[in-house]
Image (tube, rainbow, N blue to C red):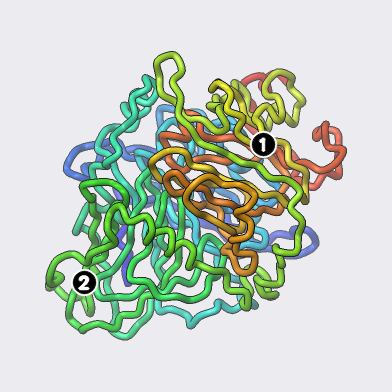
Amino acid sequence: MIRQSRSILPLFFLIRFVLVVYGGATMPTVLLDWTVSSSQLSLLGVPKQVILINNQFPGPLLNLTTNDIVSVNVFNNLAEPFLLTWNGVELRRTSWQDGTQGTNCPIQPGQNWTYNFQLKDQIGSFFYFPSLLYQKAAGGYGPIRINNRDIIPIPFSTPLQEVDILIGDWYITDYQEMRASADRGYPFPTQPDGILINGFSPFEANYNFQPGATYRLRISNVGLKTSLNFRIQDHKLLLVEVEGSYTLKQYYDSLDIHVGQSYSVLVTANQMDGMSYYMVASSRFIFPEVTGVAVVRYSSSASSPLGPLPQGPQPFNYIYSVEQARSIRWDLAVGAARPNPQGSFHYDLINITRTIVLQNGVAIFHNRQRYTVNDISYVNPDTPLKLADYFQLQGVFTPDAISDVPEGRHPSLGISVIDVRYRNFIQVVFQNTLPSLQTWHVDGYNFFVVGMDFGIWDESRHSAYNMYDAVSRSTVQVYPSSWTAILMEMDNHGMWNVRSQDYERWYLGQELYFRVKGEGQDDPSTIPDRDEAPIPSNVIKCGRASFV
């Protein structure tokens, strides 16, 4: 299979592999130089500024292996500040590299900054994207693979080839205009102008299958707000991995992939040689349906696929989607980043020390619509929370200003930080009171999705939890007027972003931060043995941190 990618100018892409000593062991280091720029492209027939990385859209594949040390030197050639965040990558004990507005000062125009992190104890399919200023609406995203070490076999036959499939909604409106509209309190339309597959408009992308061969597709929904259903005409999808977890192998005709989520499927080319077939990504839960289409060709067939596009589930069939989500289970018998089976971690035997219920909402502030979590709409302070915490800057944020449960108080603007003790095992319930689906993501962590259902959550719902083989992932959907419960071991020190993956809601206040600290770490700058990487020597200072 050949993945088509869009290259605007001759590729400037530097990868260097070296070996360094890290923690007493020799580890491979991947050194990359990425240049961020923009160009006018007409992806749906209308010119629009698109953000490129090394003159590519989507950006280059970040192809890595467990325990690799990664150094990505990002040059910002845009006219405004820029940051990348690594969606689903756990960044063990180094939220300094997370690339969100609460953890990093932005890379200013004409400047560069180097991200440095190690991929500890993780495998899987993920992606990166710009986290600031609505830039995600202009692209700037790309795929991430974290491969098994050679000593740990993958739990299925090696496919002939792997391919990264980035699907997402696309709006022809320029991202600066979308940002200005949001700032004025005017939401952008629910229905996108189109669906892109790897940056291509419908029917532009082609993939070649060899008859009888099996391919691994790593599929990520990189869009702004639209849930998508993915399918290939006359082909079954064998689900094998979800955001770093190997799953029980199950066949699906199609998969609902919500914003921010990533799936790996195996597809076997078992149809007629010389024929072509539709690959489809279509919108869910909006009307009319919006569809992206690519073509799978057997033996480089020049023919067009026969018949109509394969049908997906009914657009507003939430029951179908819920049942599919519940069917995705952890494979307890196989190893992933480590040789011991995933199921050797018995999450059902760990006592839950705290329950946090995060309820979304919408409110009007100064005649402008914003979104809330437990009645607080997040506003970014002048100094990143991570720097304010490290340098003990007073007045930037107040820990636990947001309540653990919704209290029905009058909505307000605020800076939401929840203190969580290191190694605590907590329950988080996402309660969706709105009539539309959304997804939630926790940076720096995977969590167990133990329950989801319609209605209002209460403690009685525990009896229906999956406490045996719940899938572990980093992004989870919450259906309209519904709840989703997750369990998390807080084993990653730092300041970690918790956000709605609906970009408009995130931008307009639906986020918060977990500050994960050990006992006695109230002054992190003075504790040399704290279980977190030290402040980077190249840290960018801004706001009040500029003066320390």
Residue 144 place in picture, x, y as percent:
49, 57
Residue 408 place in picture, x, y as percent:
57, 28
Label for residue 224? none
Viewer-side residue, 488 vs 458: 458
Viewer-side residue, 195 vs 545: 195
Q: Residue at x 60, y 42 (%)?
A: 98
Please tell me whether residue 323 is drawn above or below residue 398 in the rendered image.
below
Q: Nearer the viewer, mark 1 or mark 2?
A: 1
Q: Residue placed farthest to the bottom in the image?
A: 212
Horizontal side of residue 394 vs 48, given as left or right: right
Viewer-side residue, 256 vs 306: 256
Label 2 sits on residue: 277
Q: Residue at x 65, y 71 (%)?
A: 342
Q: Residue at x 83, y 37 (%)?
A: 521
Q: Quadrant of residue 254?
A: bottom left
First in sequence: mark 1 or mark 2? Answer: 2
Tell me, yes or no, if residue 519 can be seen here.
yes
Viewer-side residue, 401 vs 95: 401
Q: Quadrant of the C terminus?
A: top right
Instruction: Say few, some or many: other residues with alpha carbon within 10 Å of mark 2 (under 14 / 14 to 19 / 20 or more).
Output: many
Horizontal side of residue 95 vs 279, given as left or right: right
Q: Residue at x 59, y 50 (%)?
A: 71
Residue 518 place in picture, x, y as percent:
81, 43
Label 1 sits on residue: 404
Query: Residue type at mark 2?
Result: Tyr
